[in-house]
Every structure is written in structure tokens, then in C-alpha cells.
Image (cartoon, rainbow, N blue to C red):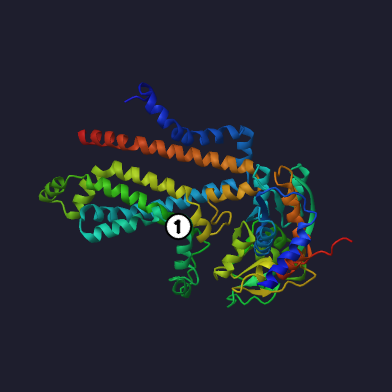
Amino acid sequence: MRFAGRPLLFLAAAPVLGLLVLPLVGLLVASSPADLAAGIGSPLFAPALWLSARTTAASLAVVVLAGTPLAWWLAVGSGRTTRVVEAVVDLPIVVPPAVVGIALLETFGRSGLLGPGLVRFGIQIPFTTLAVVLAQVVVSAPFYVQAAAAAFRRVDADLLIVARTLGQSQRGAFLRVAVPIALPGLIGGAALAWARALGEFGATLLFAGNLPGTTQTMPLAIYMALESDVRVAVALSLVLAAVSIFLLLALRLAPSAVARLQTRSARS
Amino acid sequence: MRKWSFVVALSLALIGCGGGDIEPGTLNVYAASSLTEAFGELEAAFESTHPEVDVAVTFAGSQVLRLQIAQGAPADVFASANVEHMQALVDSGLVEESVVFAHNDLVIIVPPDNPAGIEEIGDLAHAERLVLGTANVPVGDYAREVLRRAAPSHEEGFEAIVMSRVVSEESNVRLARSKVELGEADASIVYRTDAGSTDRVRVVEIPRELNLIADYPIGIVEATGMRAAAEAWIKLVGSPEGRAVLERHDFIVPTPPE
């Protein structure tokens, strides 16, 4: 299985591998510790980081709370409706984020589909932190729902039937049997969704605008910093890349760690 | 048809003469967003008289173009909406000398139904949602200056109140305008030319004593491989034809030095 033993295979893979890794190396090389300090000290940095942390936490909560039942429904269903809904869930992955942004504006904006009705209740969504969260939910939910549905599909249906015969309610069987078994997959999906929300740019810029502290998340801050101080942009990029790499590692390690924990607690 | 060929022949005579040998290829013009319509028209005019040259105009906030040129973007000509961004490139030797070819002033724009009832600059303090350019894009910088100038003649803290109503800072003037066109923002401060090139906004004038005049410099990028074409472009912009196009799009054109 080792690359080293298959020089031809490695040679074929090298261009793509290089293209994936080199930009990160470039980013690292481009910034001296002094630049990094200047970037972190920039007035754009802290508010953007804090806003990104808050909004992605909120959007992740929404995605997991609403996405888990949806994923379960998709996993147990098999009819035509299920397949249609599955396709709809995938839409935000194939639609460019800028399109998602315009679509959200035409839905929740003042002259949009729901906007006038919302305004009557004094609710205005565009250009608010809520708009940032909504954009993140739309673009990241598919990643979680897909992963969760796949994980639920791997749950043995017989186990659920056994749980029911042992007196568990339907909800009990779901929460105590299906969710724990699917947990590694759920965590993986959640991490992917979080990473996607963290990187969300296009839909946010169009739907939520750009205001430091309110709607300027890390990716927007990087874009704006590029216009004034490249060092700040590079520093912000480094931090975001580091967070993402950490997420990715967690994503790779979490399933086995969870499985290990589960077997340990099952034994005790 | 005959009239058209006469115009072409005339412009050929006007621009073509003394143009030297223009290298065939692509002329990359980097221009401030506010020049979108005017330079779009001039692009067509240039290409009809110089069929061997394909003009590609890139429009963005001047600060973005400046950064791109500083990073080695293949620009041949740079037209900025303020002197500062141009001067930075001239100072670092990336752009040769520049000349101011147009002026612009600022107006307030509101959606046609004017939801916040903005009739004069003081009303900006009553708006719920304002959109301005960022502090780096020339139009945002100018808008802040207008607000600073307006502060003494308005209520206490006018500038801060207005700035507190800003819900988004956009990186070029067209993005700011689009938020008003969509009806999402109550108002924005943009160039007169941007207000003139859409019928989806209403103009509210800024008093002359508070307004300011934006200078548009143009210059050739030092590293250009299309020098003759770049010179011809700048010549076209300053020609009677170019000046007429700019004026038609509400730019103020400086009187040419005699």
C-alpha cells in the first residue's frame, strides 16, 4: 500500500499532491513571526475571529439539531420523495455561494419573498449577524446531513427492532441505539459542516454585507485586509488555515477515539 | 451606414495619425469601477480604430487594482478614482507619470420609493440602513470626508450617528450602489456618474460647499509590453471623442492645457 514502493503511482499523484500542499507551505513561508504578530494585533483580527467563532457555533447547532432528524428520515426512507429531498439537500453544494447569497437576499430582503412580511413584524435579516448564521447554515447543512444519513444507513435495522422488542420507544431506539452507533459519522459530518461554515465567504458578503464586529467574519476580514495591508491578510489566513487543519485532524481522529470510548464505557 | 463609416474614418484620422506602430495583442486596462460605462464605450471605439488590439478592461475598486498591479498583475494602463492609489504606484516606480483626465463629485442615492425619507444630507442620521464604501476604496474615503465636512452644520455627533447606521462597507462603488438598487439599503454616497448610469436609484444632492471633487489620474504601467497601444489609449481618453464620452457619463472633464 505504500507510495514509496510504487514510484510510478507516486509520480502520477505528485502534481495534485503538490498543488494541495504547496500553497500552505507558501503561506507559512510568506509570514515572519513579526508579520504574524502585526496581523494578530490588527484591529480587524479579534472581532473577526470572535464573530466567526460565535456564528459558526450557532450555525453548527442549528445544522445538527435540525439536520439529524432530516438525515434519519432520509436514511430510513426509500421512496421517490426521499430521493427528491436528498437532491434538494445537495443543492447548496452545487450552487455557487454567490448565487446562494443573491437567493437569500431575494428571499429575506426587503423586496424579497418573505421580506415585506418580516418587516411588518419589525424583523430585518440582511446585514445582521443572523444573516451570517443563515448563510452558513444553508451552505454547510448539506455536508452534515449527507454524512449523517450515510452513517444512519449503516446502522443495522435488526438492532433497532431488537431495541423495540426490549421495550424502547421509537424515540428511545433512535437516541439510545441509532445515534450512538452512528456517532463517529455524525461527528465527522459536523466537523466538515463546521469547516465549510468557517470558510463561508460569497453568500455572506452578498447577503450579510461587510461590517467589522457584526458581519465581517474571518474570510471577509482577509478579503478586506488584502486591500489595505497584505501582512494582516496573510496572518489572518494562517490562523484560519491552522484552525482548519486542526479541524481536519480532529475529523480524522474523532471517529476512532469515539469508538474506543464507546467500547470502554460499554465494558465498564 | 455611410454616416458611421464617416465617424470611423474621422476617428481613424484623429487617433491613428502619429500613433506609431501599435503592437497587435491585448491591452489590459485596469480602471476604477466608476468608469465602467465610459471605458466600456471607449473600448469599443478603440477596437474599431485599432482592430489589431484587443482591449480588456478590468473594473474594481482602485485599491484592489493598485494591490494587483503592485503584485505584478499584467496591467498596461491604470486609471484610479483617486490620486493616492495612483501616487503610491508612481512612487514605487510601477507606474510612469500620471495625468488627471476626469473629475467626479458625490451624491446621495436612495431607492426610488425612498423608504427612509431622505431629502437632504442631514436626513442620513434618520436612516436605518446605510451602505458606504470601505475606508480604503476612494468612494468610501470621500464619503467619510463629506460627512466630516457636514458635521459642524448638523446636530451634535452627526458624523458618529450616521456612521452608526452603516450596515455594510463595500469594496467598490458599484457594490454599494447595488445594495440601494436592491432596496436593501436606505441610502449610500456614490459618485454622480454611478447615480447617472442606473434608473433604479434617486439622487439627493449634497450641498456644493460640503461636496468634494474626485480626481481621476491615468498612467502607463512601467512593465507594459504594449507601450504604443497604452499611449494610444491615453490619447483617446484625452481626445475630443474621449472627453465627449466621459462628459456624456457625467464626468467633469478638465480643460486641456493649450
Quadrant of the image containing the N terminus of chain A: top left
Q: Is residue B157 visible?
A: no
- Depth check, front residue: A260 or B249: B249
Tell whether A252 sits left or right of B79: left
Residue ID at (77%, 64%): B213
Which residue, given by chain and number where applicable, does mark 1 sit on? A135
Residue furthest to the front: B2
Look at the picture and state if B212 lies above or below A36.
below
Element type where label 1 sits in the image: helix
Q: Position of residue A264 (x, y in %)?
A: 25, 33
Q: For the residue carrying disc 1, how many other residues have a C-alpha within 10 Å: few (<14), some (14-19), or many (20+)?
A: many
The chain ID associated with circle 1 is A
Q: Position of residue A76 (x, y in %)?
A: 21, 53
Q: Residue at the right extreme?
A: B258
- Total numbered labels: 1
Front-lying residue, A78 or B42: B42
Q: Quadrant of the C terminus of chain A?
A: top left
Would you identify the image quadrant in which residue A209 lies? bottom right
Residue projecting furthest to the top? A5
Q: Nearer the viewer, residue A43 or A242?
A: A242
Is residue B213 in sight in this rendering? yes
Amino acid type at circle 1 is Ala
Image location (x, y in percent) of residue B46:
69, 59
**What x and y, as percent, mark residue B136?**
67, 53
Using the image, determine if residue B192 lies above or below residue A101.
below
